[in-house]
Image: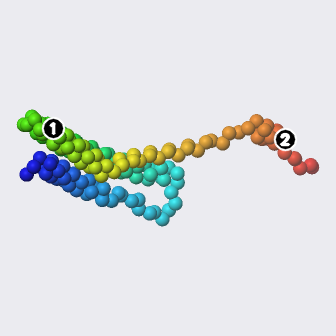
């Protein structure tokens, strides 16, 4: 088995193993809220969306960790391929072209593997808190109107 075959086999196996675990993690369904018969107020809606956010954030962190593990495996295989290419150059003088070709191939395989990972997962956005209801503010006009109404004597029946 030549160096090129062994490096390609090593990278292919590492991609296959890490790609399978990522596919399993992506297929896990997220929890969906159960519909209720009563309408929800703003606070209940916020609590529900906050729980959904927490689940989405947990899934996001899992996906990021899996992506990082895949990247590390790809990098390990790349480093092994580069070391093997450098060992070729030490063994004979005319193998400089073979070493360059092996390094170029390792770079291409690594780049393809990193590109096959796709774009990184997008972090979920945190829901906004509902605004607190404000107390009604009495204006001066309302207060003076109330005072004038109260200050008027009530009509008394005449005898």
- 140 left or right of 130? right
Q: Which mark is residue 96?
A: 1
- 47 left or right of 148? left
Q: Which mark is residue 54?
A: none
Closest to the observer, 35 or 127: 127
> Residue 110: percent from the left, percent from the top?
25, 45
Residue 148 sits in which quadrant? Answer: top right
At a point 30% along the width and 56% down the height, the residue shown is 26
At a point 7% along the width and 37% down the height, the residue shown is 91
Q: Which mark is residue 152?
A: 2
The scheme the figure's colours follow is rainbow
| Relative vertical location of residue 115 with respect to residue 150 in this rendering, above or below | below
Closer to the chain start, of discs 2 and 1, is 1
At a point 44% along the width and 63% down the height, the residue shown is 35
At a point 50% along the width and 57% down the height, the residue shown is 40
The secondary structure type at the circle numbered 1 is helix
Closest to the observer, 19 or 29: 19
Residue 138 sits in which quadrant? Answer: top right
Residue 88 sits in which quadrant? Answer: top left
Closest to the observer, 53 or 137: 53
> Residue 60: percent from the left, percent from the top?
34, 48
């Amino acid at each position: 088995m030549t160096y090129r075959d062994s490096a390609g086999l090593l990278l292919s196996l590492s991609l296959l193993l890490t790609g399978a675990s990522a596919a399993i993690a992506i297929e896990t369904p997220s929890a969906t809220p159960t519909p209720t018969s009563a309408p929800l107020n703003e606070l209940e809606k916020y609590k529900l969306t906050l729980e959904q956010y927490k689940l989405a954030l947990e899934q996001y962190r899992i996906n990021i960790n899996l992506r990082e593990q895949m990247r590390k495996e790809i990098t390990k295989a790349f480093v092994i391929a580069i070391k093997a290419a450098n060992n070729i150059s030490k063994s004979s003088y005319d193998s400089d072209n073979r070493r360059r070709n092996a390094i170029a191939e390792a770079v291409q395989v690594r780049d393809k593997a990193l590109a096959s990972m796709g774009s990184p997962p997008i972090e979920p956005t945190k829901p906004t808190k509902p605004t607190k209801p404000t107390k009604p503010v009495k204006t001066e006009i309302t207060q003076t109107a109330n005072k004038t109404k109260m200050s008027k004597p009530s009509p008394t029946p005449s005898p």
